[in-house]
Amino acid sequence: MSSENFGFIEGMMEGISRAVELKKKGEKERYKVFDWKKAEKILKEKGWPDAEAGLISDWEYTGGFIVKDKKKVHDSYTYLSSFWATPALLINGKYIDCWCYQDESPGWDSDTKWP
């Protein structure tokens, strides 16, 4: 089952289980973080439609507008990092995966807004 199909509790439990398994192997879990460069590229290609960013499977608590009326939104609530849920864009009712690993980003975290 893909983590995108988990609800919040199931996703957290799956994430904790993965973290325990990685720890047993001497490895560390990697966080996914919203990829602002990819998002900007997608939004430019689509003509800057209204768009939200958030975590699939936990959108209700993590999603918020990042573009409204063709303008970047800086004051909307979003939470954009997870070790189990997938950061994504939501444009016209369609989710688009939009993430990179946090350790490969230029310092983005859960609270980054239009760096």
Image (cartoon, helix red, strand yellow):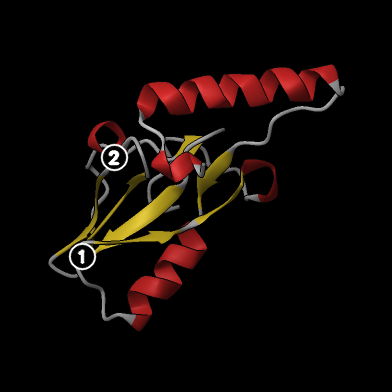
The image's mark for residue 6 is: none
- Quick check: 20 left or right of 16? right
Residue 64 on image: x %, y %:
24, 45
- As rendered, which of 53 and 112 lies closer to the eye? 53
Question: For residue 108, what is the image quadrant?
Answer: top right
Query: Which percent across, then down, holds residue 36?
Result: 46, 58
* Mark 1 lies on residue: 71
**For numbered disc 2, what is the local secondary structure?**
helix
- Image coordinates for residue 93, horizontal then vertical, percent: 21, 62
C-alpha span from label 2 to label 1: 21 Å
Which mark is on residue 59?
2
Looking at numbered disc 1 in the image, what kind of residue is underneath it?
Lys
Callout 2 crowding tier (Cα within 10 Å): few <14, some 14–19, many ≥20: some
SS at badge 1: strand
Is residue 31 rendered to the left or right of residue 75?
A: right
Q: In the rendered structure, which amino acid carries the disc numbered 2?
A: Trp
Please identify the quarter of the rendering in which residue 75 is found: top left
Q: Residue at x 25, y 37 (%)?
A: 77
The first of marks 2 and 1 along the sequence is 2
